[in-house]
Amino acid sequence: MSRISDEKFKEMLSQSSLPIRASYRPGEVCSLLGISSRTFWRLTEQYEIDQATGSPRNPNSLDSYLLRSHRRVRYNEILAYLNRNNTYERRNSPDPRQMLIFD
């Protein structure tokens, strides 16, 4: 299973010209993940913990918190999000051989 390592994530931050910090603002997260601000808000609104497993119900959601009136996403959550979605896409993507049925 391919997981995004801490070193690889730090390189992503460097490529985005972002420093390593404990948390990031919405605009920084959008830049890092290559998503729009609308997608950012949708991902944060969808976040809900499954009580049975302790993991997010929707792997394509992002945990965030409020700092006064500003939304922030923790460094560890961005790394976990990238790992969750990398694994989710690989496990749930169609087998390329299945597409041959339609040729």
Image (cartoon, rainbow, N blue to C red):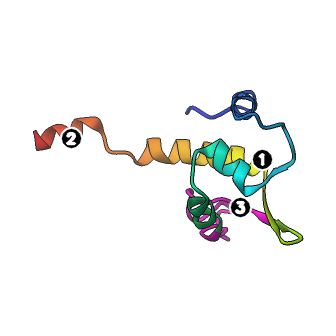
Q: Is residue 50 left or right of residue 95?
A: right
Q: Which mark is residue 99?
A: 2
On the image, the x and y values in percent for residue 79 come to 70, 43
Q: Can you tell which of label 2 and label 3 is closer to the viewer?
A: 3
Which residue appears farthest toward the right when viewing the image?
68
Q: Which residue is mark 3?
A: 63
60 is within the stretch colored magenta: yes
- Quadrant of res 96: top left
Regarding mark 2 in the picture, which secondary structure is present there? helix
Q: Left or right: where does residue 27 sit relative to residue 46?
A: right
Whether label 2 touches label 1, CB < 8 Å: no
**Outermost residue, left direction?**
103
Does residue 35 lie above or below 96 as drawn?
below
Distance from disc 3 to disc 1, alpha carbons, whole Å, reads 10 Å
Secondary structure at numbered mark 3: loop
Q: CA distance from mark 2 to mark 1?
A: 36 Å
Q: Amino acid at mark 1?
A: Asn
The secondary element bearing badge 1 is classed as helix
Q: Earlier in the sequence, mark 3 or mark 1?
A: 3
Q: Residue at x 12, y 44 (%)?
A: 102
The quadrant in which the N terminus is found is top right
Q: Reply yes or no: does residue 52 show up in magenta.
A: yes
Which label sits on residue 76? 1
Task: List x then y, in percent, for residue 101.
Answer: 13, 42
Residue 94 rendering spot, x and y as whole percentages: 32, 45
Locate the C terminus by quadrant: top left
Q: Between residues 77 and 2, which one lies in front from this camera angle?
A: 77
Q: Left or right: 67 with respect to 30?
A: right
Q: Which residues are magenta?
A: 45-65
3D distance between C-alphas at marks 2 and 3: 35 Å
Q: Amino acid at mark 2?
A: Met
